[in-house]
């Protein structure tokens, strides 16, 4: 039997081997610190080096996307797919197109995705991919040409039972359509190889709304557990994309007052609260707008404040829904000083380690994205099921199932994360609940 590894040794191993990959190390450290007692209590986990194997991607594909744009010029981008862990099912996770995409970012996202997918209870492994291509300001034709070139390479590595990508930042319904079309033409096959597809070609009702709606279903479960009500609460939201807008809409439907949205250029502040009409308009128009928040301000839906984040605004609940590490220590302090009592992540890892520490020290409710934003991938799992059965379920049944999945994730976080004094450490709860499932699946399948 191999010598047993301990978690300190694995931490040192990761730090030494991947020293420049800050986001990946941040995500792995967060999990490692929480699973110490479970790991130490199970000799099999040690003997089979489960944790080191779980931290390392099974396969990383890196390719060059050379393509000709609509003006006849050649452009060259990098593309990646991190196939992190397939013990629980086909690799599953989104594609991100953004100039900040690099291997560290995709490795952190793929690692987190395995834990998130395990929490949904559906048979999905974890992966993530994307490109450093910047779609901002590009024509629709350029977007199509890039998506087709990206898929010409990616298609050889994916499949309905192998690896099923979806959207993420800057990859929405339009991009998934172009990617899917190219896959279908090249493979002469109509199969559920991507999720988030259009409703006319194998897409699922509620997938578009699922991440944001699921976040609010989780928030509702927290409120019920704490014997309080979302109705009448003031909520700040960051981001202005798919997750942020659907979370804001569902929060307003539940009677909350949503006072902000944001992007990398600034903030939309609505003192009286955004209406569902405002939000539906934004959902309809954000994909085609240069700056949807600026457009909303022009229509008197709120005030545009350049170069500001929403975290200095007084609120009861904060929902960071934009991107990783957007909420830092000073932002956490500003939220706490203003009486914020709950922070639930819609984005992946939006709170820095220092910000998380402030929340834990103040003992407010803090829920990591792998638990609270799992609704998107859960609905993707349901889309895969519909594709496999060649059917399409109705929206209300799917919405109900989404709500029930979010409630059950909440329940498992409470079981694993409740401390003796009653405080629920949702991060620990999520990490432990997911780790148990992943580790047991890996153990059962041998080395
Ligand atoms: N789309 C999905 O189903 C899921 C998305 N997520 C995560 O949610 C987050 C948002 O994703 P989507 O809404 O899908 O993307 P999106 O592309 O629709 O929207 C992203 C939003 O974030 C803003 N943003 C980007 N960088 C920013 C920065 N540095 N500072 C402030 N704002 C910034 C953009 O302006 C945009 O409004 C990401 O972290 C993503 O990984 C998590 C689970 C599922
Ligand atoms: O729906 C999916 O497969 C992926 C969603 C995603 O990328 C995420 O949960 O971060």
Image: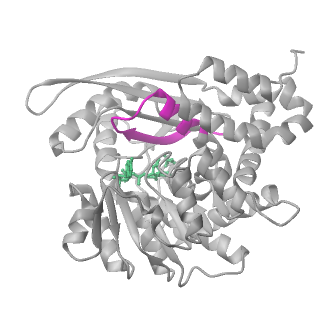
Image quarter where the C terminus lies is top right
Front residue (pair 54, 377): 54
The foreground one among 424 and 1 is: 424
The magenta span reads 88-111
Residue in the picture at 58% in, 79% down: 230
Q: Position of residue 433 (x, y in %)?
A: 75, 50
For the question of whether residue 28 can be seen, the reply is yes
Total number of numbered labels? 0
Q: Is residue 66 above or below residue 35?
A: above
Residue at the limit of the structure toward the left, as seen here: 71
What kind of colouring is applied to the model shown?
Answer: one colour
Q: Residue 316: give x, y in percent of width and height.
A: 56, 74
User: Is any part of residue 209 visible from this angle?
Assistant: no
Which quadrant would the N terminus be assigned to in this image?
Answer: top right
Residue 421, compared with residue 44, is above or below; it is: below
| Quadrant in which residue 205 is drawn | bottom left
Residue located 60% across and 69% down the image: 219
Give the x, y percent position of residue 301.
27, 76
Residue name at image x 40 percent, y 52 percent: 202
Nearer the observer, 447 or 44: 44
Q: Position of residue 224 (x, y in %)?
A: 69, 77
Task: Please name the residue shown 50% across and 83% down the image.
Answer: 255
Magenta stretch encompasses residue 260: no
């Amino acid at each position: 039997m191999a010598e047993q590894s301990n978690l300190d040794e694995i931490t040192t191993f990761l730090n030494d081997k991947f020293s420049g990959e800050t986001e990946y190390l941040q995500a792995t450290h967060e999990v490692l610190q929480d699973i110490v007692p479970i790991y130490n209590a199970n000799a099999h986990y040690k003997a089979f080096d489960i944790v080191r194997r779980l931290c390392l991607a099974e396969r990383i594909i890196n390719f060059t996307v050379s393509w000709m744009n609509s003006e006849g010029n050649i452009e060259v981008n990098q593309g990646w797919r991190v196939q992190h862990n397939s013990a629980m099912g086909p690799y599953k996770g989104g594609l991100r197109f953004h100039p900040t995409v690099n291997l560290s970012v995709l490795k952190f996202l793929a690692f987190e995705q395995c834990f998130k997918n395990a929490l949904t209870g559906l048979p999905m492994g974890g992966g993530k991919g994307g490109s450093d291509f910047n779609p901002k300001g590009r024509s629709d034709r350029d977007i199509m040409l890039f998506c087709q070139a990206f898929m010409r390479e990616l298609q050889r590595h994916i499949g309905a039972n192998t690896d099923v990508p979806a959207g993420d930042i800057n990859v929405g319904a339009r991009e998934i359509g172009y990617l899917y079309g190219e896959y279908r033409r090249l493979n002469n096959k109509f199969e559920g190889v991507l999720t988030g597809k259009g409703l006319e070609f194998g897409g699922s009702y509620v997938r578009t709304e699922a991440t944001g709606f699921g976040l609010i279903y989780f928030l509702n479960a927290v409120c019920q557990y704490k014997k309080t009500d979302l109705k009448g609460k003031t909520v700040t939201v960051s981001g202005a994309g798919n997750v942020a807008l659907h979370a804001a809409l569902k929060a307003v439907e539940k009677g909350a007052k949503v006072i902000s949205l944001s992007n990398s250029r600034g903030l939309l502040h609505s003192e009286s609260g955004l209406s569902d009409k405002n939000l539906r308009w934004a959902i309809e128009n954000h994909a085609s707008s240069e700056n949807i928040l600026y457009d909303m301000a022009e229509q008197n839906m709120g005030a545009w404040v350049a170069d500001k984040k929403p975290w200095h605004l007084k609120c009861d609940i904060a929902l960071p829904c934009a991107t990783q590490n957007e909420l830092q220590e000073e932002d956490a302090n500003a939220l706490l000083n203003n009486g914020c009592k709950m922070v639930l992540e819609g984005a992946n890892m939006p709170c820095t380690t220092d910000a998380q520490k402030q929340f834990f020290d103040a003992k407010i409710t803090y829920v990591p994205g792998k638990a609270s934003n799992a609704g998107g991938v859960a609905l993707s799992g349901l889309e895969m099921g519909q594709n496999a059965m060649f059917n399409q379920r109705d929206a209300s049944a799917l919405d109900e199932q989404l709500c029930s999945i979010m409630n059950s994730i909440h329940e498992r976080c409470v079981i694993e994360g409740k401390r003796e004094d009653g405080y629920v450490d949702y991060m620990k709860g999520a990490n432990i609940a997911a780790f148990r499932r992943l580790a047991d699946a890996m153990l059962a399948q041998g080395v």
